[in-house]
Amino acid sequence: MENRIKEWRDRRKLTQEQLGQMVGSSGQQIYKLEKSQRSLKQYWLEKLALALQVEPHELLPQVKQAPGLSESQAFNLPYTNIDKTRIITDELVGERDLPVYGSASGGPGQMVISYDPIEYVRRPSILLHVRGGFAMYVIGDSMNPRYYTGDMILIHPTRPPRPQDFVLVVLQNGNHDSGEFEVMVKRLIKMDESKVSLEQFNPSDSFEIPRAHVQKVMKIVGSYDAL
């Protein structure tokens, strides 16, 4: 499925070389991104959107609902063990432009997330017009009964988390070339310049991570089954 970089570049009457210069890159890089020879990660989405004066989601492929499918059927979930009846589409007000990132099992209580979208779903009101908002699937049982494997959680990347909020913690160790990072879904106890204190439910435990080992702490603002 083709992205819309070229469409917007043509509207702005820019060459690949001109757009490349605007984002600090090259025309060859823009060519590869337009042809999907390179992954359109969040880093490129934000830089290109700024240069083209659009919202990041406007550069993503236009995902159309298949004929004859109901709204709930059209989610096209990739995991066969997910109970699709739990996904409720009430209060979903945006276009089908919210990226859903894939995840896999990591270390104990951890997941590995890839910033390459595996699908796009309708944007809920809580993430409407939120730049960089995304969803991802939970893998593992460390936060049962709050979140189960297969739950699709919603992430607000810029809203500051507060103590007792559920958060997605992105760790520093990861493969930046492949765009894969180790993450944890936990509840925030507190965070300061030296450490991040977290809580998990299964098994019940609290622990601290040096702030230097943490890349981001992002607020979880809900999940599709809780809308």
Image (cartoon, helix red, strand yellow):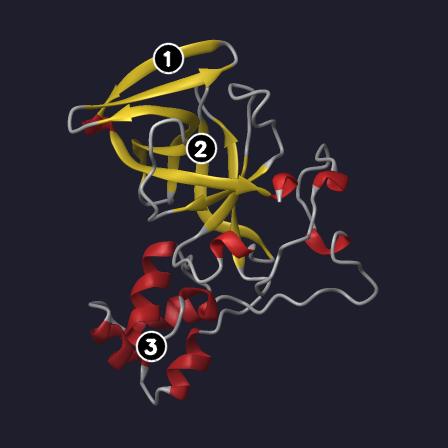
The circle drawn on residue 206 is 1
Q: Where residue 43 appears, x then y in whole percent?
A: 32, 56
**Residue in the image at 41% along x and 25% along y:** 187
Discs 2, 1 touching: Cβ within 8 Å: no
Residue 65 picture quarter: bottom right
Along the line of sight, which residue is nearer the eye, 189 or 117? 189
Q: Is residue 206 visible?
A: yes
Labels 3 and 1: the sequence-earlier one: 3
What kind of residue is marked 2?
A: Val
Marks 3, 1: nearer the viewer: 1
Along the line of sight, which residue is nearer the eye, 155 or 56? 155
Residue sitting farthest toward the left: 193
Marks 2, 1: nearer the viewer: 1
Which residue carries the number 2 mark?
Answer: 112
Which residue carries the number 3 mark?
Answer: 52
The local secondary structure at tag 1 comes to strand
Residue 41 picture quarter: bottom left
In this rendering, position of residue 211 left or right of residue 64 = left
Discs 2, 3 touching: Cβ within 8 Å: no
Q: Where residue 175 appears, x then y in whole percent?
A: 33, 38
The alpha-carbon separation of the residues under discs 2 and 1 comes to: 21 Å
